[in-house]
Structure formats: structure tokens, C-alpha cells
Amino acid sequence: MSTRRARRPRILIAHRDAAWVDQAKGRLESLGYAVTECLEPDWTPDLLAGSRPYDLAAVTSELDPAAQATILKLVRDRKTATKILLLLDELDSATLHFKGPDGILTHRISRDNIHDFAVAVAAAVGVPSRKPEA
């Protein structure tokens, strides 16, 4: 019998709304994800290019254009294996178009339903496995 634990999926949440990030982080951690929060979303490119790998980065659409371009370049050049989930605010009417096989996911966030966000994360990276109880 092995005592090795399965690796928990690592999620980065980059958004300026501390209350929403706290709720989303709590929900994901309760499901078994390892979550890192970043309240300065413009730091996201540095975090994605760093030595700590993430399975998914949920990033606000309200980024500095240079940060957006850097993230897209990291994905396009395959310098990160992190899946990107672009968070659109409830009132954001942006339409996003991407060419090529590099899938960037989008999710419209709502203060009222963190559950939908957790479902989107699970759909993108899978559900963490729970160690069976003895």
C-alpha cells in the first residue's frame, strides 16, 4: 500500500477584488485545490514564467495591455503549460476572439455564485482526488 498522496491541482487567482478572491479561494480549497491569490493581476506574467507551476490561472480581463500581451505570448510560445481562464466581470460586454489551437477559456464571474466558478475550474483541470478514508 502506498502512502504517496496525489498532487493537488494548483490554481492561481489574479483579480483585484479581494472579497471575491477570498470567496473563490475558500471554495476551491474546500474542494481540495491548492490556491495562490494575486491581488495585483499585472504580476501574473511573472508568476506564470516563474518556477512554481500552475495547472490553471484565473485572471481578470482588467489587465494592463502589456501584461495581456505577455500572457498571450507565454501561451503562444508554449513557455507555460498553465491553462488560462480569463475572468469577465458581470458587466463586461467584451467579445473575445482567438485564433489557433491555444485555447484561452473565459468565465463571467458573479459575486452571487462562486459555485459556477468552481465548476469552471473543475471542468478545466479536473476534480482533485480525495484520499480514501481507512
Image (cartoon, grey):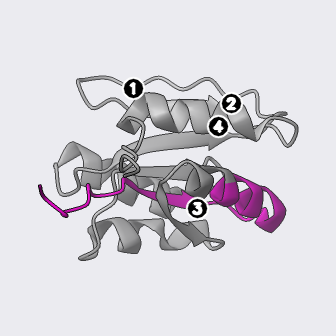
Question: Which circle marks residue 41 in the picture?
Answer: none
Amino acid at dot 4: Phe
Whether residue 91 is situated above or below residue 84 in the rendered picture: above
Q: Residues within 10 Å of mark 3 (few under 14, many from 20)?
A: many
| Cα gap from disc 2 to disc 4, whole angstroms | 4 Å
| Cα gap from disc 3 to disc 1, whole angstroms | 21 Å
x and y percent of residue 134 in the render? 37, 52
Question: Which circle marks residue 116 in the picture?
Answer: 2
Q: Earlier in the sequence, mark 2 or mark 3?
A: 3
| Cα gap from disc 4 to disc 3, whole angstroms | 14 Å
Query: Are the residues at dot 4 and dot 3 in contact (C-beta closer than 8 Å)?
Result: no
Whether residue 52 is situated above or below residue 110 in the rendered picture: below
Amino acid at dot 2: Asp
Residue depth check, mark 4 versus mark 3: number of the one nearer the observer = 4
Q: Earlier in the sequence, mark 1 or mark 2?
A: 1
Q: Residue at x 54, y 26 (%)?
A: 96
x and y percent of residue 52 in the render? 29, 73
Q: Residues within 10 Å of mark 1 (few under 14, many from 20)?
A: few
Q: Residue at x 68, y 29 (%)?
A: 94
Q: Residues within 10 Å of mark 2 (few under 14, many from 20)?
A: some
Horizontally, is 47 left or right of 21 in the view?
Answer: left
Query: Are the residues at dot 1 and dot 4 in contact (C-beta closer than 8 Å)?
Result: no
- Snapshot quadrant of residue 38: bottom right
Residue at image mark 4:
117
